[in-house]
Image: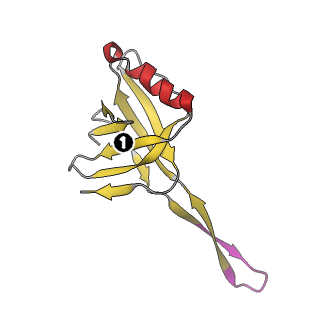
Amino acid sequence: MRQVHVADRAFAVAADSDGNRDLGGMSADVQMNGDGSSRNILTRKGWEVDGLALAINDAQGDQEFLQAVIDDGVDVPIAFVQAGNVTYSGTGIPKGDFKMSTMNITAPLSFGGPGNLLKHS
């Protein structure tokens, strides 16, 4: 992953980040019936990307900006630019506790939102 854009603000992703992407949609489970047959249970879920470490620039107020997005609690446009310039985008917010490493000048973040991430080439 090369960059994450949060509300049109670009953040570089640490080269050693190993992110996980869930496009959203449905989650499936199989439940058994007493006669040995089964039924499929589908549950709607939102999209999620986790495992990313974003570069934080204190001079530009990056930590304050991301915290304000979290504090507002309103979904914003988020785009994930892959190494091959393929982009996935949706609306959502950074998830979980937001802490910055002062040694690495990065922040491990997860993102999530409603609906699905859409692929753009």
User: Residue 26 at what x, y percent from top left?
Assistant: 54, 64
Badge count: 1
Q: Please state which of residues 54 and 34 is positioned toward the viewer in this rendering.
A: 54
Q: Furthest-left residue in view?
A: 84
- Which stretch did the figure color magenta? 28-38
Q: Residue at x 56, y 27 (%)?
A: 71
Does the magenta run of residues contain 14?
A: no
| Residue bearing mark 1 | 18
What amino acid type is highlighted by mark number 1? Answer: Asp
Q: Residue at x 43, y 40 (%)?
A: 51
Left-right relation of 54 to 116: left
User: Residue 25 at what x, y percent from top left?
Assistant: 51, 62
**Quadrant of the frame with the C terminus:** bottom left
Quarter of the image holding residue 100? top left
The kind of secondary structure element at disc 1 is: loop
**Dot 1: within a 10 Å radius of its alpha carbon, few (fewer than 14), some, or many (20 or more) residues?**
few
Does the magenta run of residues contain 35?
A: yes
